[in-house]
Amino acid sequence: MRATARAQPNIALIKYWGKRDPARNLPAVGSISVTLGDLYTEMTVSLDAGFDRDRLVVNEQDNESMLPRISACLDNVIGTSRAHARVDSLCNFPVAAGLASSASSFAATVVAASAASGASASTATLASLAGQASGSAARSLYGGFAELKNTRNDVSVETILDGHDWPLKVVIAVTSDGPKPVSSGKAMEISRKTSPFYGRWIEKQHDDLRIAREAIDDQDFEKLAQVSEHNCLKMHSVMWASRPPIVYWNAATVDCMQGIRELRSSGVGVFFTIDAGPQVKAVCIASDEARVRDALSAIAGVTDVLSTGLGEGARLVESA
Ligand code: PMV
């Protein structure tokens, strides 16, 4: 039994930071993201009673470090009495570059695993299963502008605006391709336990979500720009005030932010957001994409610039 699914990374505009239930990986706050179009991960799950162990092959190389998380994800989707699996992962963008490859990987894994086991789970169920592996992965089951809400015991995700209805672009400035100093999961727990700003971050998230939802409904770029940059900087302030401090930025990260703010004050439709890493994501109006690309490419320390439109949610590509 074999199935292949494809999923794209998503970039949060209103961020998930903090877990209300670390054991079940349930987020402390809701979030809003955009699902990207051209960057993708394809996962092929082959289940075979003849295999004596699970195996993960990433871009044609065996990968032991991610294997335990993939195996746990397969157990969640199919059950622990399943056959062993070979999982092949193909990614068309740099995996280690902090571009949310875990979100696209787990979103594609749950879709492929469910199909390979012969089940027909709903998108809502698959989103919840993906979220148990990586909180942000739940959003990659949905395309365009996606909102994740906390429900009593779980999460629910929906597309709040189709990407075709507001075809923004995302330009990614890569400023380092080294591994993260600390994983987002660990960093969230350090923030929850030690940051004096953590409680306030949680309290204020409802306001940011409401403002972003209004901005998306009205396609009000300036309003979305202001609330997204504010929410991003607030999340990083929570991290900076943690003990030990969590600082993901480098000098080029700061220069990119500055460059983007200058562009916006000169009339270019662009804003920045940054996740648990040093890369800067510039969200922009389609007609301004070339200017944003040129400006970010010229910043010292930027090693690569990728750009993409918005895309659809995770889906099955092949099943046999
Ligand atoms: O899904 P995780 O555990 O990798 O956490 C993602 C956290 C951020 O990327 C910083 C924010 C978000 O909402 O995606």
Image (spheres, grey):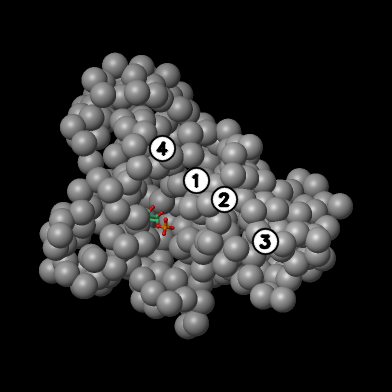
Tell me whether the residue at label 3 lies in contact with that at label 4, contact meaning CB atoms closer than 8 angstroms.
no
- Tell me the tag on residue 105: 2
Tell me whether the residue at label 4 lies in contact with that at label 2, contact meaning CB atoms closer than 8 angstroms.
no
**Assess mark 2: CB under 8 A from ligand 1?**
no
- Tell me the tag on residue 97: 4
Ligand 1 resides in the quarter of the picture at bottom left
Label 3 secondary element: loop
Q: Amino acid at mark 1?
A: Ser
Q: Of label 3 and label 4, which has the lower sequence position?
A: 3
Decide: few, some or many residues near mark 2? Use Cα within 10 Å; few <14, some 14-19, many ≥20: many
Label 2 secondary element: helix
Decide: few, some or many residues near mark 3? Use Cα within 10 Å; few <14, some 14-19, many ≥20: few
* Residue name at image x 70 percent, y 53 percent: 86
Label 1 secondary element: helix
Would residue 66 appear left or right of 195 to someone viewing this image?
right
Whether residue 241 is visible here, answered yes or no, is: yes
Whether residue 269 is visible here, answered yes or no, is: no
- Numbered disc in front, either 2 or 3: 3
* Residue name at image x 48 percent, y 52 percent: 65
Report how far apart the C-alphas of labels 3 and 4 lie in the structure: 29 Å
**Quadrant hosting residue 176:** top left
Disc 3: which residue: 53
Disc 1: which residue: 101
